[in-house]
Image: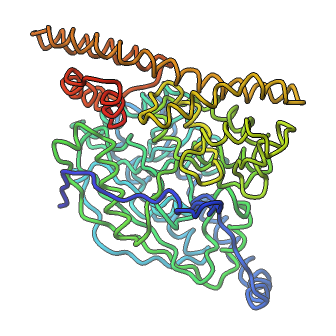
């Protein structure tokens, strides 16, 4: 059994860049298949000799399984499938369907190698499978005896496969409906802790398909029940990675065709020991998910990247806006927890960013901003404004830096030199607006103006606000009152309705004592820069 108590795992979110140079980030949603002349000849021969036989075998297995599943579901309602596990003959029929569907994959040319042992339901009620990189990952579902799966709502509408998935008594989730996600978690908790003889629940914690070259962020849903989970790793160790499908790559039908015209396609399923959560992990599902992902990444020998399906959506939008697809990979989940991003706002920000950014490398440089504003690049006001934003002197701003700067408008400038830079730059706005020949550029300038003005105002008034709350807190003796007072002040500082975690609130309150001892604005700014 595995047990972890801390969440210390390194993540890969991109590579470090030299000044003026941009290195695109690791893209887990991009996949390419390069076919040599030999590969094309082999596929042609297979399409003539093997493919017809395989299609007949696959069709036979699929129709037989569909017929048996339909019989097994006769007389059942969707509510009954959710409330009680199947028993008796229905359970036997489901096991038969699983065997036939495994035969379907063998007819498709798959050869499967298994490592480790599948745990019993009482040892690990939940199975987590990663990486989710192929339409063929459903092989594992049937290979494991048709455990319940967590699948998107659209799956039930698929011809043939929708009925087979329904026969596993799945838990459906609608990714566009926040209430559906909550109900899914509640149902998982109910089944995992139920005394009924539910089969194991299988979930793909990544929530979407990637290229399998890394592990993207695990969604915490599978880890909310706080019970032992068994990690299951899947690989396709072939010279040509034809089974892999993801959003930026060959269409799904091509991956199926390419795979079925290979002489043989290998798959490996590896069961890791059940992972028993610590008390900390039971309280914090995200830590639980992160630690399990770390263990699976070690087994697979791949890096972990903090991207999710939301990043994939931004990536596809960036492509439509003629930006490099990697421009949309910003780690939405992490940024949302810190800044309270909304998806529609991010898409709107990406539209604004695309109007200014260089289409070749997807960043904003001084000359890009000058071109957009139709102002000469040597204009001292423009250079001063860009310098206020480019305080790390890289010479460019990525989309992530663009939106973080916009959302961080209420943060205090934590160094006096930065404040002076902001104050100096803000004096140039009136002249800049007059110099701009394009009225459509006003929106960008006004956004940047608002940010610098807020910094200026906070620089002047933050000392007064923090002194007041420090004095009030110092006078309070009751712990509950202290928490309420601190929380109220925290909401005042986060006047832009930023979403704040309890951990961040706790860290802030711990800083109250240090703030009460500060004697000048510089000390307060330094404390604020360290998270207080």
Residue 130 lies, in percent from the top left, at 44, 60
For the residue pair 61 and 17, the one nearer the viewer reads as: 17
Residue 435 lies, in percent from the top left, at 85, 29
Q: Is residue 274 left or right of residue 219?
A: left
Dividing the image into 4 quarters, which one contains the N terminus? bottom left
Q: Quadrant of residue 51?
A: bottom right
Q: Quadrant of residue 317?
A: top right
Residue 20 lies, in percent from the top left, at 65, 60
Q: Residue at x 56, y 58 (%)?
A: 210
For the residue pair 112 and 455, the one nearer the viewer reads as: 455
Using the image, determine if residue 235 lies above or below residue 437.
below
For the residue pair 242 and 344, the one nearer the viewer reads as: 344
Residue 96 seen in this snapshot: no
Q: Residue furthest right?
A: 437
For the residue pair 163 and 314, the one nearer the viewer reads as: 314
Q: Residue at x 32, y 58 (%)?
A: 9
Q: Residue at x 18, y 24 (%)?
A: 513
Q: Residue furthest left?
A: 477
Using the image, determine if residue 143 lies above or below residue 281.
below
Total labels drawn: 0
Using the image, determine if residue 291 lies above or below residue 71.
below
């Amino acid at each position: 059994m595995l047990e972890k108590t801390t969440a210390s795992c390194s993540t890969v979110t991109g590579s470090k860049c030299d000044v003026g140079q941009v290195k695109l980030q690791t893209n887990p949603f991009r996949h390419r298949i390069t076919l040599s002349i030999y590969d094309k000849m082999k596929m042609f021969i297979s399409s003539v000799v093997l493919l017809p036989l395989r299609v007949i075998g696959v069709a036979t297995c699929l129709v037989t399984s569909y017929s048996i599943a339909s019989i097994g579901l006769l007389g059942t309602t969707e509510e009954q499938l959710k409330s009680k596990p199947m028993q008796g003959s229905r359970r036997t029929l489901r096991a038969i369907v699983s065997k036939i569907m495994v035969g379907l994959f063998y007819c498709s040319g798959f050869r499967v190698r298994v490592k480790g042992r599948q745990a019993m339901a009482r040892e690990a009620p939940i199975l987590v499978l990663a990486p989710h990189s192929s339409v063929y990952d459903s092989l594992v579902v049937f290979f494991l005896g048709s455990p319940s799966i967590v699948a998107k709502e659209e799956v039930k509408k698929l011809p043939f496969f929708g009925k087979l998935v329904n026969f596993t008594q799945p838990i459906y989730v609608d990714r566009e409906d926040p209430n559906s996600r909550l109900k899914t978690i509640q149902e998982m908790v109910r089944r995992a802790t139920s005394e009924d003889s539910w089969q194991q629940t299988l979930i793909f914690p990544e929530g979407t398909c990637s290229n399998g070259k890394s592990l993207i962020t695990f969604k915490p849903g599978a880890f909310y029940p706080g019970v032992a989970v068994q990690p299951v790793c899947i690989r396709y160790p072939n010279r040509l990675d034809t089974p892999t499908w993801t959003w930026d790559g060959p269409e799904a039908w091509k991956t199926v065709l390419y795979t079925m015209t290979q002489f043989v396609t290998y798959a490996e399923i590896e069961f890791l020991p059940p992972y028993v959560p610590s008390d900390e992990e039971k309280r914090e599902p995200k830590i639980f998910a992160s630690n399990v992902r770390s263990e699976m990444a070690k087994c697979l020998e791949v890096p972990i990247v903090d991207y999710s399906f939301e990043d994939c959506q931004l990536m596809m939008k960036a492509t439509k806006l003629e930006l490099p697809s990697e421009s949309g990979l910003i780690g939405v989940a992490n940024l949302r927890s810190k800044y309270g991003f909304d998806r529609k706002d991010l898409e709107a920000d990406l539209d604004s960013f695309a109007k200014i950014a260089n289409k070749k490398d997807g960043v904003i440089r001084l000359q890009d901003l000058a071109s957009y504003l139709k102002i000469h690049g040597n204009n001292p006001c423009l250079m001063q404004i860009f310098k206020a934003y480019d305080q790390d002197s890289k010479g460019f701003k990525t989309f992530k830096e663009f939106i973080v700067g916009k959302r961080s408008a209420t943060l205090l400038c934590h160094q006096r030199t930065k404040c002076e830079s902001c104050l100096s730059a803000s004096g140039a706005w009136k002249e800049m607006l007059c110099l701009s020949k394009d009225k459509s550029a006003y929106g960008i300038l006004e956004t940047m103006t608002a940010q610098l003005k807020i910094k200026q105002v906070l620089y002047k008034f933050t000392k007064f606000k923090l002194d007041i709350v420090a004095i009030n807190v110092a006078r309070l003796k009751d712990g509950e009152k202290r928490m309420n007072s601190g929380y109220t002040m925290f909401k005042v500082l986060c006047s832009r309705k930023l979403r704040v975690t309890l951990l961040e609130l706790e860290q802030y309150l711990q800083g109250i004592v240090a703030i009460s001892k500060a004697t000048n604005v510089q000390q307060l700014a330094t404390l604020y820069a360290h998270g207080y």
